[in-house]
Amino acid sequence: MFLNNRFFHSVAAGFTLGIMLLASSCVDIPDYNNTSRDNFEALWSIMDEHYCFFEYKNVDWDSIHTVYSQRIGNDMSSESLFLLLNEMLQTLQDGHVNLSTPFDVGRYWKWFEDYPANYDQTLIDGLLGTDYRIASGMRYKVLDDNIGYIRYADFSSGLGESNLDYVIEAFGLCDGIIIDVRNNGGGLLSNSDRFAARFFNQRDTVGYIRHKTGKGHNDFSAPYPVSIEPSTRLRYQKPVIVLTNRSCFSATNDFVNAMRRAPTVTILGDKTGGGSGLPFNSELPNGWSVRFSACPMLDAAMRQIEFGIEPDVPVDLRKEDLLEGKDTMIEAARQKIKEIN
Amino acid sequence: MFLLLWGIILPLAAQETEPPVALTYQSSLVGIGRAKVYDSYLSPLSYSGTHIGFLFEQMKQTGLCEKKIFAQHQLNATFADAKNPAGTAEDYAGALTYNYGLYYRFPEIKRFQFFAGGQIGGLFGMLYNSRNGNNPVDVKADFSFNLSGIAAYRMQIKQQLVNLRYQINVLVAGGLLSPEYGQSYYEIGLGEGGSYAYFASLHNRIAINQLLSVEFPFQICTLRFSFSHRFYQTNINDLQTQLIDRAIYIGLSRNFYTVRGKQSTSNHYRYVFE
């Protein structure tokens, strides 16, 4: 008979082999329950395996586990657990680290809370008046002394190529441009790159990016260059001042990092807030979300910019000017453009 | 003959000396069931939810090995909507799988039929997590050589003919695409170099698809019910994926032949599963 016992034995052996392969499954899914202990362990492991600044910030994450593990109780309320987990995350001193719950968002904001604001919205509103133009996320106007002013408050706001065409064309006869990105907390890196491309005349490597290649704290890929390609559309050639303060974070930090290499650009104001780790998201068994820095971005000299970028011209907002309705930093920028010209 | 002939007019003037006409088996089904989705690039938690799918099968005799070799096309489109254990986030998983297989049909034993062979095929799919910002998507693309077997049995319950069939596909070797462990799609978008293609075999990918089907031939159609169980698991660059779905499919089957050149005058037909 064609289908003899050997055939059936072979089939049985095949199935057995298949079952053994399944049993020795190469995927190890964490078995978390929704308890305080498991939520703590899940959060600690997520950060342990994915966070990218342990060594740079000299954080001993194992000792953090030892300290906070002892404070986890089985009957903790959600609020108590949140406070403890958020306190643990604060040790990372990272504005990109957030624990989001239905009742609160854990955050580290000392990168701007501990410094002068260097920004007053009423001064901006007074400067722009009511006859300014709006191009998607940008408000812009030609000031009395023939200097163009752009207020861009959020890199998440739309920034299309045609928007930039119109804005640059409107400032074609101006002596220079002030780009005010103070209090801009970031957004899309693609917007940052698109905006910066209007001020470069040749390709330039403005920084590098790395990513984790494994769970070890120092498992990183080789730095990969991040370059700005000059826009093939309208490019601005006259002096440009970028206004910064401590609330320039994340994609805005990236924008400032690129713009400081553009040939006609001066960075003026306060140090930026930093935030150079491209954030990833994850979650805890109880459904809370956690955001964390996953891919470090470096400047053109391969230095960390996680804690901010110093301006070329440091200027603070003076109280005396504030009382007179003047923005010290904008006035300094106008003066700088006149000096350059 | 236990399966219904569809869509053709059979020649009535039979010639006993003509060889039997080889019919093509074809079936289309839709299904619904449960899915379990785990992808460590997106979340450390396993998601579960609803699976829906479409399955198309076609199988016919070839002229190879004295017509003992059969060719099969399998196309499977699936979609899953799964939630995390707390119900606060969703994963959407979509995939399109195609396999082309060649099978040797062993001689029938007491209404049992066995086919054994291999397939080549591929999968293209995507997992999307609604909550993630810079890591919202994990694209799945792989191709493979599969071992496959089919067992079929026909029986009669009272006056009703019933055809049972079981098929198993085991992915053996091939390749797949994967980002590195913590690589963002922003970096990939920059054109970052590196190897995204990896050799895949049982050491880093275990994938088994099983299909248990029962068919009821009626006068006007052949009704098919199938239970599908698919297990797909990979571990590349410490990125782990496990997709499991179990679903009930329902659809229609038919047997037909395509006329090319001179039409056969035979009224004898050879079915794929007879």
Image (cartoon, grey):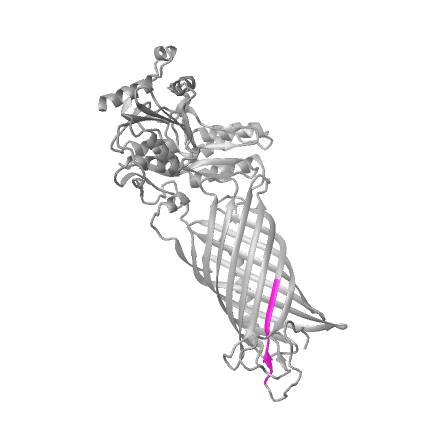
Query: To which quarter of the image does residue B157 belong?
Result: bottom right
Q: Which residues are magenta?
A: B19-28
**Residue at figure coordinates x 32%, y 39% from the top left:** A233
Q: In the rendering, at what x and y percent does residue B260 appear?
A: 54, 78
Task: Answer yes or no: is residue A202 visible.
Answer: yes
**Residue at figure coordinates x 60%, y 86% from the top left:** B18
Q: Pick the residue in front: B104 or A91.
A: B104
Q: Is residue B21 magenta?
A: yes
Q: Pick the residue in front: A62 or A262.
A: A262
Question: Eyeballing the image, is B33 above or below A129?
Answer: below
Query: To which quarter of the image does residue B107 belong?
Result: bottom right
Q: In the rendering, at what x and y percent does residue B156 appear?
A: 72, 73
The quadrant the N terminus of chain B occupies is bottom right
Identity of the residue furthest to the right in this view: B158
Q: Is residue A78 magenta?
A: no
Identity of the residue furthest to the bottom in this view: B17
| B1 left or right of B84 in image | right
Q: Main secondary structure of the magenta part?
A: strand
Question: Eyeballing the image, is A41 above or below B175?
Answer: above
Query: To which quarter of the image does residue B177 belong?
Result: bottom left
Q: Pick the residue in front: B104 or A33.
A: B104
Q: In the rendering, at what x and y percent does residue B109 appear?
A: 63, 78
